[in-house]
Amino acid sequence: MTGRLIVLTGPSGVGKGTLLKALLERHPELYLSISATTRSPREGEVDGTHYYFYPRDRFEATIEAGALLEWAEFAGNYYGTPIEPVRGRIDRGESMILEIELAGARQVAKIFPTALRIFILPPDLTTLEARIRERATDSEDAIIRRLEQAKVEIAAQGEFDYQIINDDFQTALGELEGLVAQGK
């Protein structure tokens, strides 16, 4: 049995993380990919559990070796997905989920064209803005940047196999479960 790679993408604030957490609680047979980063660990983060924490030179060597499924530089730090743990799980017949940004999803599509690619959408931009503001973690400038980026990302939804509108959480979770179950 061959495992499956599942790529979950959508704009910031759409609820990807909340949907993914609920999906993983209901389906412990699914595995969440662990990203590598050059940023310093935050309080409570454990290397190999939350992230793989790499020094910058190691991350750059990993890029050069072609050992990342996808990667990007954001706010002066690298972030990426080491390819070997993903391939290992899939080769063992297990399913692996990547929760990544649009650019990373595009990179993954080139390496794993058979990946199940799911795009999570907000019901509308007004709702998305309200969700981002409710988190109360961003400055006004950051909120504006997130909303502008969301418009770019939403415009790319057609690049994905499926789109789920996260309007009602239980409905969206049921749709996500159904899509994931199809690949088993």
Image: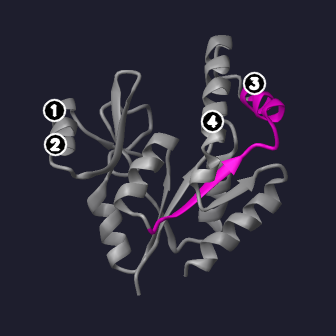
Mark 3 Cα-neighbour bin, 10 Å: few <14, some 14–19, many ≥20:
some
Q: Distance from label 4 to label 1 (Cα)? A: 29 Å
Please, which residue is most extreme toward the bottom here?
A: 1
Mark nearest the camera among 3 and 2 is 2
Instruction: Please name the amino acid that badge 4 sits on.
Output: Ser
Instruction: Find residue 171 and report its image quarter.
Output: bottom right
Q: Secondary structure at mark 3?
A: helix
Pointer 1 residue: 57
Q: What numbered label is drawn on residue 12?
A: 4
The colour mode here is one colour
Q: Distance from label 2 to label 4 (Cα)? A: 29 Å
Q: Secondary structure at mark 4?
A: loop
Instruction: Find residue 108 and report its image quarter.
Output: bottom left
145 or 23: nearer the eye? 145
Q: Distance from label 1 to label 2 (Cα)? A: 11 Å
| Relative image position of residue 154 (x, y in whole percent) | 66, 40
Residue drawn at (63%, 52%) of the image? 158
Q: Horizontal placement of 116 versus 120: left or right? A: left
Q: Earlier in the sequence, mark 1 or mark 2?
A: 1
Q: Earlier in the sequence, mark 3 or mark 4?
A: 4
Magenta-highlighted residues? 114-134
Mark 4 Cα-neighbour bin, 10 Å: few <14, some 14–19, many ≥20:
many
Q: Distance from label 3 to label 1 (Cα)? A: 37 Å
Instruction: Please name the amino acid that badge 1 sits on.
Output: Asp
Q: What numbered label is drawn on residue 64?
A: 2
Mark nearest the camera among 1 and 2 is 2
Pointer 3 residue: 133
Can residue 132 be seen at all in this image of the molecule? yes
Instruction: Please name the amino acid that badge 2 sits on.
Output: Glu
Q: What numbered label is drawn on residue 1?
A: none
